Image: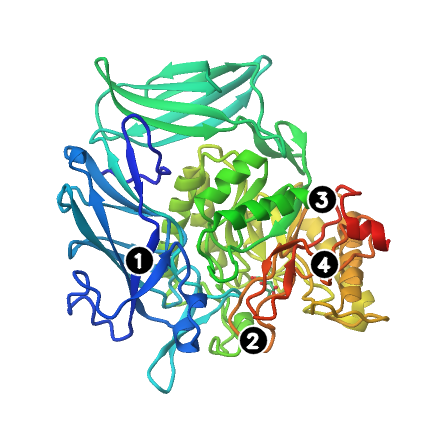
Amino acid sequence: MNRSLLYPRATTTRRLIGLDGMWRFSFDPESKGVEAGWALDLPSSVSMPVPASFCDLFTDKASREYCGDFWYETSFFVPAEWSGWDIVLRFGSVTHRARIFVNGVEVAQHEGGFLPFDATVTNIVRYNQFNKLSVLANNELSETMLPAGTTRTLADGRKIAAPYFDFYNYAGIHRPVWLMALPKERVLDYSTRYRLTETGAEIDYTVSTNGPHPVTVELYDGTTRVAESSGTTGTLVVKNAKLWNIHAAYLYDLVIRIHEGSAVVDEYLDRIGIRTFEIRHGRFLLNGSPVYLRGFGRHEDADIRGRGLDLPTVKRDFELMKWIGANCFRTSHYPYAEEIYQMADEEGFLIIDEVPAVGFLQSTANFLAANQGNGRQQGFFEKETTPALLKNHKAALTDMIDRDKNHPSVIAWSLLNEPQCTSAGTEEYFKPLFELARRLDPQKRPRTYTVLMTSLPDTSKGQRFADFVSLNRYYGWYVLGGAGLADAEAAFHHEMDGWAKVLHGRPLIFTEYGTDNLSGAHKLPSVMWSAEYQNEYLEMTHAVFDHYDFVQGELVWNFADFQTTEGILRVDGNKKASLPASASPRMRRTSSGSGGQRCRSISRSEKMIPKTAAPCRFAPAGRCLFDMLFT
Ligand code: CKU
């Protein structure tokens, strides 16, 4: 079996052609395309960019909200000199499921909208000619998939997605598509593990290939080879190793080769960072030194392109995160594009990598948007659908760890977001997942899941599995908000005192906290949605954090405003990033008004209201003109 999630790279033995660009596109609401031969010729298609979500490109609501089957089509040229190689198509992600056809022949199927897959097409392609590539995708939601939701049918027969999660169900070919020529005998995977020594570092590695020939592994610091070894497992000894660190990333080039006599059969190159990450005595230790996690929960979400990878946006986001002094983000609520992890590797950011296990809760999701859910109050892990869900969950977790295990930036795995975890089936559901993550990860990174507000220290059945506890808390927003802020603080303390009793030396971080903000709203005294209220909320919340030594991180919700399903609780999306100037001297001051032009992007509305990045209390001082003028 030649399964490989390695990132596509051109080397002396590998060739790549990028297939991104303008493709053809058609909705298929009656799911008749396969029978009607659309894989050979897509009728009445429109142009469609790849990568991108299709949703926000249309100007009519039926197209934006389309739910069901849809097709993409392009053609690709296979050079004659590629004959004798394995020809493989590689998709970074297609949301949520895909069937791939080449010249009308089905070559792959994949479920799960946030992880890569490939299709070997060696025996199907025509050399020195153009070949037709068709993708039949589908964006329906169900309770057995990640993320979870349901699909409803409107009176006119159209399907509509009803997410159980608080982000828009963007769909399309979201990440790059590659055509690759690979040697028949090749590297399929590799992994590394780091040990710091008195004189430098040791890197234990494993390489898997699909053939019998010997393997060598070399490590380069620029053009200088600093370590080498041979065999599919071994150790690279690096003297005076330069460690990868926060905002001070140092990357080495890893070169893996398969040799047959004097010939190199395959060569794979990657960039790795030498670092250790562990939990000890209630602290996160990076290279043995304590680190407090500061940063954001985020989304892959931008105007027009939706969840499609956009490198300028990626760059801008990292610049904003650096500017504000963040060191960490969670890939809420799904694994992000590989290019984002590469950027984090380069820039020295820590990532809590989250599998798309979100929406595993019916009752709360029901009230977040107008067209969601079914109002039932029940556990999510005691249903007929639970075994199928667990199977898909394991598959997604396996692929995420396979894909991301070599990134120095990835420091932890988040196995679920806000599941219903107080009911009887929780432990049976959680245990195999936590065991799987431990088994699959060569670096044995800590595992966590984010704990919903209604799951408390004494009722949360899942928390005992976590290596560190992650709380999403909104005291003063979803509960006891407004004039009740003092009560919110008391209730928050009460809960924290409860966590103190069950942590048993584990650190606890906040993976979400925040309030929505109406851009430009100011009021004295404050009201909810105003800038002033956000300040008061954040001050209170931070004071609670600082009261507890076991709190070892804070990731504010959210880095940027993001789109959600429309509903009475969301004003054209979730607006928790429109944070105003903070009253806290520790808080980065930004404005959602005219002073706050540090926009990641503009809003989706034609009013072009800027989105602002969230302020953080950990930003280095003195870099903001607005601060100097108005404080
Ligand atoms: C965030 C009920 C709390 C849901 N939680 C998860 C996240 O996806 C949401 O966007 C909180 C929020 O802003 O409500």
Residue 44: x and y, percent?
25, 70
Question: Which of marks 3 and 1 precedes in the sequence?
Answer: 1
Q: Residue at x 45, y 24 (%)?
A: 253
* Quarter holding residue 121: top left
Find disc 2 in the rendering and name its residue.
367
Find disc 1 in the rendering and name its residue.
23
> Ligand 1 closer than 8 Å to the CB at disc 1?
no
**Label 1 crowding class (10 Å Cα cut-off): few <14, some 14-19, many 20+?**
many
Find disc 4 in the rendering and name its residue.
495
SS state under label 3: loop
Q: Of discs 4 and 2, which sits in the foreground?
A: 2
Tell me if residue 373 comes above or below residue 48 in the rendering.
below
SS state under label 2: helix
Report how far apart the C-alphas of labels 4 and 2 lie in the structure.
24 Å
Q: Report whether residue 503 is seen.
A: no
**Which residue type does callout 2 highlight?**
Phe
**Which residue type does callout 4 highlight?**
Glu
> Ligand 1 closer than 8 Å to the CB at disc 3?
no
Residue 611: x and y, percent?
63, 60
* Quarter holding residue 520: bottom right
Find disc 3 in the rendering and name its residue.
550
Report how far apart the C-alphas of labels 4 and 3 lie in the structure.
14 Å
Report how far apart the C-alphas of labels 1 and 3 lie in the structure.
51 Å
Question: Which of marks 2 and 1 precedes in the sequence?
Answer: 1
Q: Of discs 1 and 2, which sits in the foreground?
A: 1
Question: Which of marks 2 and 3 precedes in the sequence?
Answer: 2
Left or right: where 595 falls relative to 211 = right
Residues marked 1 and 3 touching at CB (< 8 Å): no
